Amino acid sequence: MASARTVPGFADSASFREAATRVVAVRTEEVFEHTEHVLDTSDIERVHDMRVATRRLRAALEIFAICFPKAQHRKVLKEVKRLADALGERRDPDVAIEAFARVRDTLPAGDRDGIKHLIEHLRVRQAGANETLGEALERVQREGLHERLLALTAEVQPA
Amino acid sequence: MRARKVKGLAPEMPLDEALQRIAETRLKEVRSFEHAVHDPDAVEDLHDMRIAAKRLRYVLEMSEPVLGAKARHGAKQAKKLQELLGEIHDCDEHLPLVERHLARLRGEDATAVAATAARTAADLEPAAAREAPHRRHYAGLEALAAYLRARRDVLYRRFVREWARLEKADFAASLNGEVT
């Protein structure tokens, strides 16, 4: 899992508001850098990394809420939460499959069938969650969430 | 779980003062779940405590360039707590998932076995058990359920020890990195 990127100039911010623009801009870029190959179920770390980046963005939006115009902030926060939910729905079966497979691999061959069967069920759920995530990503792109998040930070840039 | 409102924040206030206020509020939020620490069945509260620890961690991680090494230390403690509670939460989610799956298989097996008898049959032959399609699935799933239950217990005991350690080391100083 990638660490959060350092926010340039954060410590030198003259006010809470100035820090808000810097943090939200960096956290926004971190989320959208992870969109490529996120629907590839053979590499579950991609969803995990994007989910963590989304949670950090959401945390920043919540921490700095008072620094942004209320209506725009509420709208983008809601959309970031929706994206986080879709990522979470995909991540849940990923985690369960990985955890159950670790137990399965330690059992004698004759005792593995049940866990294999359960994992097959979870793969179906994973595929469904992947479709939902695909739709969520399309929506984010169609509605320009990335651009609106950056515009939100530009709007409150100090003079 | 909604985050507690941080009192006294203003956009034009100095950054260090704002971060300190937020960290204090987030620490109180974590401690507000103290009552759940010694209740292994407080699944929802332990889950909410994990979310509170995550919020504290993020604000302390963010604060490090302003509040210094103590914020980094506090963030590490909060991360440790969050991750441990996360592992417990995974067990709390996975065990019911396995049990629901087992219940579904038992239902499907009973239906398949019953289908071997005529509607007017007086009894069911023992050999009908062979017609249960999932009969080879139970051993592994029962072992998995036992493992998840046992792992949850082990992790919970570790969490209680970790909490006691934090309290002994002065909880506020450890988790808040002495920023207050």
Image (cartoon, grey):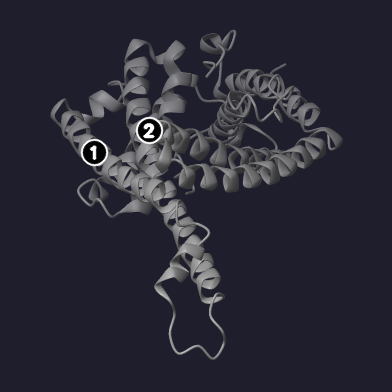
Distance from Cα at disc 2 to Cα at disc 1: 16 Å
On the image, the x and y values in percent for residue B79 come to: 38, 26
Kind of residue at disc 1 = Val
Residue identified by numbered label 2: B82
On the image, the x and y values in percent for residue A90 come to: 62, 39
Sequence-first disc among 2 and 1: 2
Q: Give left or right: position of A42 versus A92.
A: right
Viewer can see residue B24: no
Mark 1 element type: helix
Please tell me which residue is depicted at 70% across the width and 39% down the height of the picture.
A130
The quarter of the displayed image where residue A76 is located: top right
Q: Is residue A66 above or below residue B136?
A: above
Is B41 in front, or is B137? B137
Is B166 in front, or is B103? B103
Viewer can see residue A125: yes
Residue identified by numbered label 1: B154
Please tell me which residue is depicted at 40% across the width and 37% down the height of the picture.
B86
On the image, the x and y values in percent for residue B70 come to: 32, 15
Mark 2 element type: helix
Kind of residue at disc 2 = Gln
Q: Give left or right: position of B15 versus A23.
A: left
- Give the chain letter at badge 1: B
On the image, the x and y values in percent for residue B140 come to: 40, 45
Q: Which mark is residue B145?
A: none
Question: Dot 2, crowdedness within 10 Å: few (<14), some or many (≥20)?
Answer: many
Please tell me which residue is depicted at 62% across the width and 42% down the height of the picture.
A123
Please tell me which residue is depicted at 75% across the width and 26% down the height of the picture.
A155
The quarter of the displayed image where residue B42 is located: bottom left
Question: Dot 1, crowdedness within 10 Å: few (<14), some or many (≥20)?
Answer: few
- Give the chain letter at badge 2: B
Is B80 in front, or is B14? B80
The quarter of the displayed image where residue B177 is located: top left
